Amino acid sequence: MPYFTNQDGYELYYEQLNPNSKKCTVILLHGFASSLQFFKEQIKVLKNHYRIICFDALGHGKSDHPKELNLSKNMRDEIIRDLEDLLEHLNVKGPYGIIGHSLTGGMIGQLICKKHPEDVKFLILLNSGYINTDNVLRNIFYNLLPYMIRINFLDVIDDSIVDILDNTKPYIVQALSNSLYDVNLSKDEIDMILESQIFGMVNEIKEYKPSYIKCPTLIVGGRLDNFAPEQMAEELHHKIPHSKLEIVDFAGHFGPAQRGERYNKIILEFIKSIH
């Protein structure tokens, strides 16, 4: 199985399919607590036309898993760095297309557009949004939020974030105590890191203006998505200039796997329209 060693010495699993394709290279970015295997329905059809590159981020899938859990560390910079190193390892040059799933995979795709605008030919965001949950604490916190808060997130956080955080803290601490990792921190230390992470996430959302995304962008949401609701996809569509929005009926957060045929049709039509 193919692995490459990242700058921290960890072995990361990757896959490259149809490397001799003369058409566009497509990079797949999975979400938090997922893996490249999530895209198996998309890979089945994309590999027939395009060069596909995907990898399991550190701590995910077949890649190395750190023995210690760093609660204050966000993954975005390391994932972008690891992707850059993988592309260099495979001698891949731009332009390439990016497909990102969920909040973390989609947001990292958006950030790559900011860092490498000249290299990104197109961006496809599947069941994504404008929130970055690339951290264990942020992910647990967001998973605890009721659906009604998620669909009105931008309106709710200004007035209620302190109360929401206070109500979720006990459950987050309990989740960490049940973790496979050893979290050798006191409750006060966890509280301090948690507040820093969540208030930091809220500030990022308020300041986030993805007008830097200039490439053709497709946003695909699921009508039944409780994690990244269709309202979030619609708001992301408003934030990204000249983007295209598709909402898939009878599709939840894992729509690309649940309704692969429908998602694949939308994805392929979009890519072909660019060419």
Image (cartoon, rainbow, N blue to C red):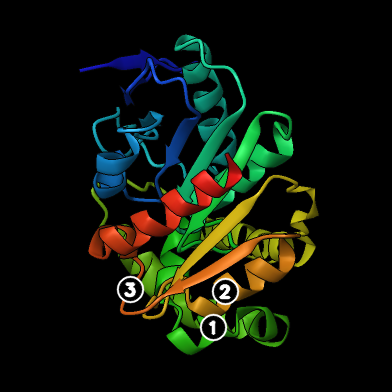
- Decide: is 187 above or below 84: below
Name the quarter where the C terminus is drawn: top right
Indicate whether 275 appears above or below 262: above
Q: Is residue 15 left or right of residue 76?
A: left
> Residue 232's mark?
2
N-terminal label among 3 and 2: 2
The amino acid on which the numbered mark 1 sits, given as a three-letter code, is Ile
- In-front residue for pair 139/251: 251
Determine if residue 254 is in view. no
Residue at image mark 3 = 251
How many numbered badges does the structure rendering display? 3
Answer whether labels 1 and 2 touch (C-beta < 8 Å). Answer: yes
Is residue 153 something one can see in this rendering?
yes
Marks 3 and 2 sit apart, C-alpha to C-alpha, by 15 Å
Q: Where's the N terminus, which quadrant? A: top left
Task: Depth check: give the residue in front, 273 or 166.
Answer: 273
Q: Identify the residue at image location x=35%, y=54%.
A: 264
Q: Badge 3: few (under 14), some or many (20 or more) residues near its Cα, within 10 Å?
A: many
Query: Which image quadrant for residue 248?
Result: bottom left
Query: Which mark is drawn over residue 151?
Result: 1
* Residue 103 spot, x, y in % from top left: 50, 58
